[in-house]
Structures are given as C-alpha cells and as structure tokens.
Amino acid sequence: QVQLQESGPGLVKPSQTLSLTCTVSGGSISSGGYYWSWIRQHPGKGLDWIGYIYYSGGTYYKPSLKSRVTISIDTSKNQFSLKLSSVTAADTAVYYCARMSSVGAQMYYFDYWGQGTLVTVSS
Amino acid sequence: QSVLTQPPSVSGAPGQRVTISCTGSTSNIGAGFDVHWYQQLPGTAPKLLIYANSNRPSRVPDRFSGSKSGTSASLAITGLQAEDEADYYCQSYDSSLSALVFGTGTRVTVL
C-alpha cells in the first residue's frame, strides 16, 4: 500500500518561498508509470492542481503558477518536493502530495494522496 | 473559477439514490478527456472514487458509479448511507488551460 506524507513549515512570511517535501513509502518513486504531484486546497474551497514530476525529472506545472513553482525529486530518499516563491496570503492552503496514474495522454488521475499539511502565509 | 461546474449540494434520505453532475465544455469533457471522481470526508484528504469515467478501484463499493456523455459527467450513489456524507469533486484535463482541473465540488447530505 503506497503512502505519502507531507512535511515542512506551517508558517511562511509573505514574499518568501514555501518549501514542502513529500515522502513516499510502500513503493519506489523510481518505478515507471506514475507521476508525482502537488495539489492545494484553499480554506473552505475546492481543489487546485499545482504541477507534477516524473521519476526521470521531467516536470509540468499549471501555467498560471509556472513562474513561481519548482518541483524536484530525490529518488535516493524516495521523496519529491515543492517550492513556491514570492508567496502571498492567497497561497494559504492545505497542500497535498499525490501519486498520479494515467490511462492515456492527459488522462491523469490521483490514486493515492497524502494527509495534507496546512501552510499559512502571514507575517 | 473552475471550468467544471457541479451543484453546490445534493441531499437524500438513507437508501435513496442521488446523482451529482459535472458540466464542462468542448475543451475538457467534450474533447474526450476522461473524468475522475473523488470523495473528501470531513477533515480528511480526498480519495479516488471513480477513474476513467466509470471505473471503480477495488476498495470502492459498487453503490458508486460514474458515467459520461457529451460535455458532462455524472456520479451516482445508490443506497445512500450516513457514511457517504462528504464533498465530491470531479476532475479532468482542459486543453485551453493546458491544466488538470477539478470541479467546483458538491456536498452530499444524508437526511
């Protein structure tokens, strides 16, 4: 059973960089066929996809966030990470990491999720 | 502002059947991209409920079913149970936005 766990600071100051790590257990992050993704949920709101990375290091980001997002992977630690720069209060959200599976081109779905971590942007 | 629209809430008595719609457009559902559904119980992370329009992971009861037609998709819950009270989200891909997108979400209340 694949499990994912987010970790990182729960409080970030405005204009700084939000950094989170997702640790994967119960399976290798290097096994092909899966993508590793970040999703966020603003308080009381819906889900917002941020981007994903493949084990080879290839990435794809939501175009509206692309200028501020970096997702990286460390296969030796079975982890992948999110960095979101120049944060504002609008970036306050619960951040989830998730495994993505595919049934075809652009046919991605999230089959395993972490429990989520709340990140608050405030001075 | 999501490109996939869901009713804010639906409700039903125990044992009844409820359906949740997910309305998109020709740049997402209508373009042939699959629709997936998630259940988010209060205070927890979302869980995959239906993938590729109508497929259930093995752990999901067959009370849950999905369908897709044209620019819309639907999730049906038959034999509604108290434990089904949750938020439900559809998800697909939008070619105009070049992004994975989620629906606006629907809260299911068991009366």
Image (cartoon, coloured by chain):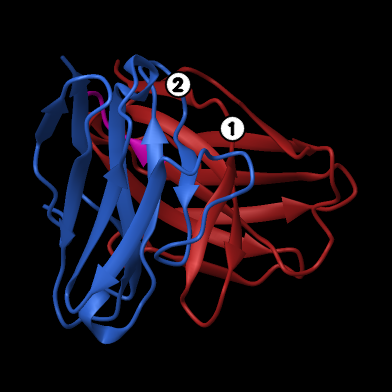
Chain colours: A red, B blue
Task: Give the quarter of the image for residue B81.
Answer: top left
SS label for mark 2: loop
Look at the image and give the residue range highlighted in magenta: A40-45
Q: Give me the chain letter of mark 2.
A: B
Q: Is residue B76 above or below residue A13?
A: below
User: What x and y, as percent, mark residue B110?
Assistant: 21, 18
Which of A61 and B83 lies nearest the eye of the viewer?
Answer: B83
Judge the density around disc 2: few (<14), some (14-19), many (≥20) Cα neighbours within 10 Å: few
Q: Is residue A38 left or right of residue B31?
A: right
**Disc 1 target residue:** A114
Q: How many marks?
A: 2
Mark identifier at residue B44: 2
**Same-chain status of marks 1 and 2:** no
Q: Is residue B92 magenta?
A: no
User: What x and y, as percent, mark residue A29?
Assistant: 79, 53
Residue at left offset 35%, top offset 42%: A86
